[in-house]
Amino acid sequence: PLGKRGKTLFLSLALILKSITMLVITLLSSFSLLVVGQKTNFWKKDFFLDFSYDTATKNGPNDWEEVNTDGSEYEQFTSYQWHLIFDLELEGNVCDNEVRPSPIALNVNNECPDDHDIRTRRITARDCKKDDVTFEVTPHALRAYYPKNDLECYRPTIMMDGSNSPFLLVWMELHMRSEHVVDGKRYDAELQMVHIGTRNSNDEMATISVLIDASANEDHSEFQFLLDQWQTVADSEEDRCDRRRANRNLRENVRKQAIINSIRPNESSSTQFIEDIYSSHTAEQSHRRDQNCNPNRQSACGPRRRMFPYSMWPSIWYFRYSGGLTTPPCSSFVNWRILDAPMMISRRQFKQLAKLQASYRNDKCDQEPVLTPEGENFRPLQSSNSNRQPVSHCTSQDFDESLYLPGNQ
């Protein structure tokens, strides 16, 4: 039988083991992905830049030039990250000296220089599916990340006029309200599909923007899929914070135990570079339309079926201009294409989107004060550099939709 000291020691050990178990559960919920089937968080705390969309704050848009941009997410795509695949040129924070600022009002002042639409490649069985996308709620925006390489699935790519190299989709993000303005109208939201250039375009990015109008009577089914995934993440974070609040005192005591420090995950401050496996699916030829197809020969030729998320495009025509990032460091290496027709969603979906936008919580379950008081995250319009930022509107007057033979549709 245990003596009095033995019982006391046993109870103490039992309490410590119980505390350790509860902390491990909390840590696992914090450091594992919150979407079933996904393996690692893409957005890291190391990527957080201390800027706000609220013009009334000291780190708001009027003072973005003061933001320290070291360690930004875009450093993954620079040449010194152990590879020569991507070569974005970051020159520090240039928010006060932008050569081609963004966003701007889309006032057309130039003819469309393009002779074909934004081309997507043929769908294959190895393409990334919706389940391969990692959804995350970050402090500044809702994000949806594609895998970091093509080992498990082929990532979506596009080919734009004027470039002989594909652009690779790396993530999507949402802004409320829209960052770009058309004919004086700011839309309810803007879904930006962010691409990184490859090969001869590896020092550029391309962003395809879908403006969003929340006045439809019915839900948009594919957009609802995005909302559902972000809702899963937000609900999981809320559960984490509920557990944290319920066990706050216990965890604070356990953190003081030296044994706990031995199981705490070691977060690396370095950014993980993105690998790129060049395979036949990214070849220039895969994006070209078939030479035997043209608008005057209707035989069996037809438009190409677009993979997700390009299947959400409401138009093949667009506004185009050369601009920059709409967040610090504001670098001017982005080819902007803003589709000229909006995606229509319902008011119910818009309300869900607004709630999700403000659902981010940090490790302490506090909300980061980075949105405007209205919960918005768009950068105010910038004055365009008319000499270096001609704005064009490419329409059916400039080109027809690319047509393909049945085997390439």
Image (cartoon, rainbow, N blue to C red):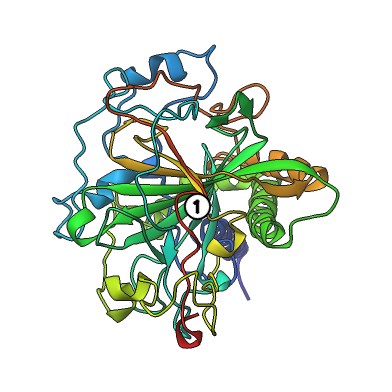
Is residue 189 or residue 226 the one in the foreground?
A: 189
Counting from the top left corner in percent of width and height, residue 258 is at 39, 51
The residue sitting at 50% across, 80% down in the picture is: 409
Counting from the top left corner in percent of width and height, residue 107 is at 49, 26
Where is residue 159, by image quadrant?
A: bottom left
Count of marks overlaid on the render = 1
Counting from the top left corner in percent of width and height, residue 226 is at 64, 58
How many residues crowd around disc 1 within 10 Å: few (fewer than 14), some, or many (20 or more)? Answer: many
The residue sitting at 75% across, 41% down in the picture is: 214
Is residue 79 or residue 194 the one in the foreground?
A: 194
The residue sitting at 24% across, 61% down in the picture is: 164
The residue sitting at 51% across, 73% down in the picture is: 304
* In-image side of 376 versus 351 (left or right): left
Task: Identify whether 399 is placed above or below 39.
Answer: above
Give the residue pinned by disc 1.
172
Task: Identify whether 394 is placed above or below 31.
Answer: above
SS at mark 1 in the image: strand
The answer to whether residue 406 is visible is yes
Where is residue 115, by image quadrant?
A: bottom left
Where is residue 331, by image quadrant?
A: top left
Task: Work out which quarter of the rendered image holds the N terminus and state it.
Answer: bottom right
The answer to whether residue 283 is visible is no
Give the residue type that dot 1 points to.
Met
Task: Identify whether 302 is placed above or below 317.
Answer: below
* In-image side of 67 versus 43 (left or right): left
Is residue 306 or residue 278 the one in the foreground?
A: 306
Counting from the top left corner in percent of width and height, residue 402 is at 46, 67
Is residue 116 or residue 244 the one in the foreground?
A: 116
Task: Identify whether 353 is placed above or below 132.
Answer: above
